Image (cartoon, grey):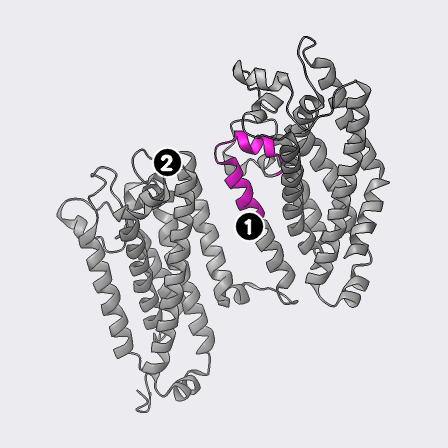
Amino acid sequence: MIRSLRQGFAEAFCSPATVVATVLIGAFEIFQALAMPPDQVVNAWDVIIAVLSDAKSSALIGIIWWYLMLVPVLTDSARELRLIRDGTIFTVCVRHLWALVGKLGAAAAQVVLATLGIVLGFGYEWRLEWSAWARSAVADGFLAAYSSPAYSAQFDSPTVLLVLVALFSGMGMLSTGAVALALAVRGYPLTAMIGYGVFVVWTMWSSFAVELPTFIDTSAVVTFGWATLRPNGLLAAVLWWTVCLLLAAGLALWPVGTVGWKRLVNSRWASLSALWALALLGILPHIFGGSPGPSPVLRGFFAGPFGDIVSYTIPVIISIAFATSFLARLQEETSGYVLYRALRAGSYRRWIRSHLVREITYAALLTTGLGALLLIMETSNGQPLHRTLNDPSYAVSLVGFFAVTIVLVALAAGFIWLPTPREAAWLTAMGATLVLGYLPPSGTLSSLSVLVPYALDPGLPPDSLPVIQLIGTISLAATASGVVLVRAVPRHADALY
């Protein structure tokens, strides 16, 4: 790894792209030095912080330089030889990442050398403390974005701030670049190059826009100063890093071979990850424009038929997709081997019961992950954690979602014995579920809305909960599971109950 680090450092330090990027940042530092107030006592940090923490240094010049460093790695012509030498995709990715870390270090070294020459050439003092102007400007209320006064109010040491700025930008570039790298090593270099190019263009564009929602403003992923100015910008950046690193690790560790839809559907963890990602997409709009009152994210996501069509559809689609994945696995397992499976289990009922118990466990895991997402997003929206946990609608909605999912799972287990084409029958049943759940639950019929027991009516007080619907759905889930176990016997079972 040290060899990869050293090689990456040497390549980037001698690269014309690094020299040009350093010259541009140096030019910005010269302009900043000329623009400093002549009647104030300033030092080198007032110039350095104003330039290096700005989005134009990281989300404009920096991201273009990073893409130019990344493209040769994505299009590496010796990748097959590296795979033979290292043995696994993951090892190749790690070696490339160490080389990219070296390239980041080379760029940082050049910028430090150029900065030292500029600030010393202008005669600025170099002290490990804020200037008198930075502290007096805070007292006078001057807190312009990216300026040293804005940061001196938050950080005691400018050195700590500069290290944070560098680490933040490096982490943003490495985490997002790791996804493209893993794709390229798996054999999709063109897709990786084009995809990351789109990300670079979007990051550059978003560095000029101020009205973008925080979680799609990718300039905040690589710019510490901009992330601190955006609402929940630091949290959004950490989430971006985490998701990108997990995705890159998944791509690097996934077994080599064709990943078809059938394999993805049959993979439990792939299904759960996709459903959590869908839930996250449904949650994000309620962070940016949530309803007033307690737990706006929770109430927006679980609005059901009381909200817009998207708020209603996403939770229902998640439950339907989970049950559909279960049905696909059952159908795969029963294709010509159902009698053998039943013989191994002892009976058809024991066989289907083992599947139901396992699927109920995964449904609980799905619900737990959804609850964790809601907690994180509600907290990032400014609501204290204890307030969300003490909100009874949080537990009621999640239990209602879990109960609906179990109803559909039991229905899928019953469909496995149908003599008619299961696909057509299942599509019909799920279409009916979508339509019936969206019917306006009003008047005396509102308590019969067992398909959306988690729906929270915004027109009622916050403590008014759909308890009757929840009890009805739990009863329906228990009844459906019991019926499936009793009727889990196909035709011509030969007394194998």
Q: Is residue 233 magenta?
A: yes
Near mark 2 (Cα within 10 A), the count class, few <14, some 14-19 or many ≥20, is some
Per the rendered image, the range of residues in magenta is: 222-243
Which residue reaches farthest right? 14
In terms of secondary structure, where does tag 2 sit? loop
Residue type, mark 2 in image: Gly
Q: Residue at x 25, y 74 (%)?
A: 483
Residue 491: horizontal and vertical position, in percent?
32, 84
Which of the labelled discs sits on residue 155, or is there none?
none
Where's residue 115, x and y in %?
Answer: 77, 28
In the rendered image, which residue does mark 2 sit on?
A: 290
Q: Amino acid at mark 1?
A: Val
Query: Residue at coordinates 59% horizontally, 59% vertically from top-left?
Result: 250
Is 416 drawn above or below residue 36 in the view shown? below
SS at circle 1:
helix
Return the x and y of residue 348 as percentages of the image width and height: 34, 83
What distance separates the C-alpha of mark 2 from that of mark 1?
24 Å
On the picture, is 357 further left or further right than 150? left
Residue at x 25%, y 38% (from the top left corner): 458
Residue 100 showing in the rendered view: yes
**Relative horizontal placement of residue 260, taking residue 57 as reference (left or right):** left
Whether residue 76 appears in this view of the structure is no
Q: Which mark is residue 243?
A: 1
